[in-house]
Image (cartoon, grey):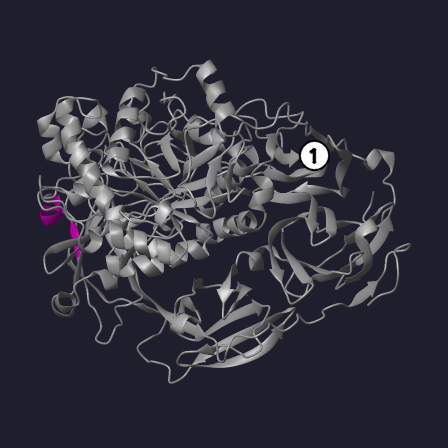
Amino acid sequence: MSSSGLPLPPSASPAPLRLRVSAPAAPPLTGHLPLSDAPGVPDPVEVTGRCLTRGGRPWFPVSGEFHYTRCPAGEWEEELLKMKAGGVTAVASYVIWIHHEETEGRIRFDGDRDLRRFARLCARHGLDLVPRIGPWCHAEVRNGGLPDWVLARTRAPRTDDPAYLAPVRTWFEAVAAQLAGLERAHGGPVVAVQIENELYDGPDHLLTLKRMAQAAGLSAPLWTSTAWGGVRLPPGELFPLYGGYPEAFWTEADGGWPDTCRKHFFFTHQRDDEGIGADLRPTAVRGTGPADLAALTERFPWATCELGGGMAVSYHRRPRVEAADVAALALTKIGCGSVWQGYYMFHGGTNPVGGRTTLQESHATGYPNDLPVLTYDFQAPLGEYGQYRPSYDELRLQHLMLAGFGHLVAPMESFLPERRPTGQDDRDTLRWAVRGEGESGFLFVNNHQPHGELPDHPDTVFTVEFPRAPALTLPSAPVTVPAGAYFCWPLRLDVAGLRLDWATAQPVCTVDDGPGRTVLVLAAVEGVPVELALDARAVTSVRVPSGKWSAVGDRVMVTGLEPGTDCLVEVETARGGRVGLLVLDAATARTAYRGVAWGAERLVLCAAGVVFDEHADGGRGEVRVHGPAAGELSFAVLPAPRRPPAVTGARVRQTADGVFTRYTALADGRDPRRHGTVEAVLTKLRDAGPAPEPVTGVRGRASAPADASYDTVAAEYAVAVPDGLPFTGTLLRVHWSGDVARAYVDGAFVADQFHTGRTWDIGLHRLPAFALRGEGLRLKVLPRHADARVYVAGDDGDGGGDRGGGRPDRASGAVAEVARAEWVMTRTWVIRASGPPSRPAAYPVASRAGGRPPGAATADP
């Protein structure tokens, strides 16, 4: 059909891409695992063979890794709220043994190591907690997290050697004491406990560790284990969790883009990733055979704990991960069948300073990668200092969908089309899949991968067959799937009594806009015309803001829409309900947040970072925005509160923005010290000398330059800290080239970076203010030797550069210099209700055309 509902000429009718959703051969297994929740909890967690349930309802958790010992304790609460606003429902965190007990017998849970306080903050804000207790955790930590003194005691770590198990038992008992009373039985947040990490061939040892943890007092409905690398697990005892990264720092400098990373941008039903951690195990050894894999697939749903939220950089290999890489991989995994989206890392961090040694993974401890001493930013959605990255917005859009519709997606199986890519080098076959059951589903498309743009796919039409309903062929007119696009479209989605047969836009969330009014928010796909197909039998009347609607058979087709804040299609249903279909343009949709604000669930559009704190303002709740330090703050709300919210220290102007109400906050008495971004004054103290001679370590991989090089051959710059510069919310953003760099305050080493072609951020609020006001900040930059076997994905100093080479970069980095630096300032805007919470106002009527479909009952309201 054309958009007008007329048949296309035969020559213009492309063959649709076809997929069949089949009926399940048998119901999913239930009650088959020795995993159970605490008795009497109101929302018991259970595992079926297809998904997780909570309180008897399908449950789609989203977990994000955040290491509390890599972040100052004073920042934990706000960073947790950022994660929650980003759609994270469970916080995963390694409990890193060496961070707590570097010296035998001195177990520290104080300050930035206060596990109990961190867990209580998770509970306060409704976040589940997944402690990953090791004892070996990897995490790019010295010895994988095992203290040096433990390794000195045993020749067989990570086994049932009594000399190893004895200190492990003491460690588990200490962790259990910190989490006592925070179990599910007591209303606590601990929903899962991970045992060990990446141990592929020790099922008996894994079971020993689980029993020891239980004996120590730890409890959770879910006990998990990482499952990549052909793992062998004790049958039924540990829930296998998988992963997938868009890039890898742990492979060779000249190895190109690993095939094990490439495969994650295809829709498959292969859960295992033999590439994760492959530098620490013999890849020829596979613990799990086909029969074992089949048994795991039948007994456990596909859940993940390490989807790449970014990627660390090692000295020899420094990959670049972009927002689209993270988001396309994550969406593809949902289409593949994931029922638990777990990210590593979701929030970057900084390694603590060790009392005896540095605490990063390095060649010095026999590990195959040299990592930076301090930074563990990981290019994560939330950076080392809590910076918002574009990947945060991309993932939040997906997580809003899972919050609203995850209970529908989770029990649906994944189905692949008849025509699929022939292999990982096939760039021309469109990659798509459907999660579906019965008569409905969700269609997933990924046309993005790193290291080489995929082509446009013109004249695309899909046909999806269902076992209990007629097939759907969509859209009504062929579309082009643009290069770089990735999206999800709903198939027969019920919204408050309205059946949406399809939409060529991604579901975001629903918003209750007063009694009897529900708004489904959709995100347009850039470059794809928006089409809504409504089941006419459920429709009484339709009003459209732009474009047109027409009756085609038993459907009402809405086409020609112009996405935006005023693109609200209003439908009255046969049940007497009122449903709005709000289609936002792609850019605006990525500014959407949903949370409890001023006493009600609301949708907030804001280009800055929003958090919802329900406990603030005497329990009435407040919204905080981490946004511009200078100028004005603008945000839009649906539904609007009856009284404009109050912004601390600012005047608020209210205007209409389509169906939203927009508020613009103008700071009263603008602080002249806050200019948003100002150039930093740099003084060059010393030119760089000859690059240090290359040194190789484990496996012949390039090693980071020795500490002494920074005092002898590094270029050195002084950065003056202006009087009155606010420390809170201020970053020093450094544009530099070279090999590696470090920052010092009063001679103390405070920050570092391996060059990746990106700017280097240093959080001023983490540095000693007194010393900064005196000597200031010193930056030392080393050049890279032309013979160093180092791969750098982009090396232009400002975030550009080639991403496709995959070979050692021997020429770039030879010049060590800081081109410029600036102070980047933000402020926290506090937004509170200006009166008692009240019923939200109805959304404005944005209709510009309306009517009822021919044959539909009764008249317009």
Which quarter of the figure is the C terminus placed in? bottom right
List the single residue furthest toward the front.
40
Going by the numbered disc 1, the residue's amino acid type is Gly
Mark 1 — residue? 438
Q: Residue furthest bottom?
A: 669
Q: Is residue 519 left or right of residue 698?
A: right
Q: Residue at x 24, y 52 (%)?
A: 817
Which x, y percent locates residue 650?
A: 43, 81
Range of residues picked out in magenta:
709-716
- Name the spot of residue 795 as percent of width and height, x first: 35, 45
Label 1 sits on a secondary structure element that is loop
Quarter of the image where the N terminus is located: top right
Q: Is residue 509 magenta?
A: no
Please identify the quarter of the rendering in which residue 588 is found.
Answer: bottom right
Q: How many marks?
A: 1
Q: Nearer the viewer, residue 647 or 125?
A: 125
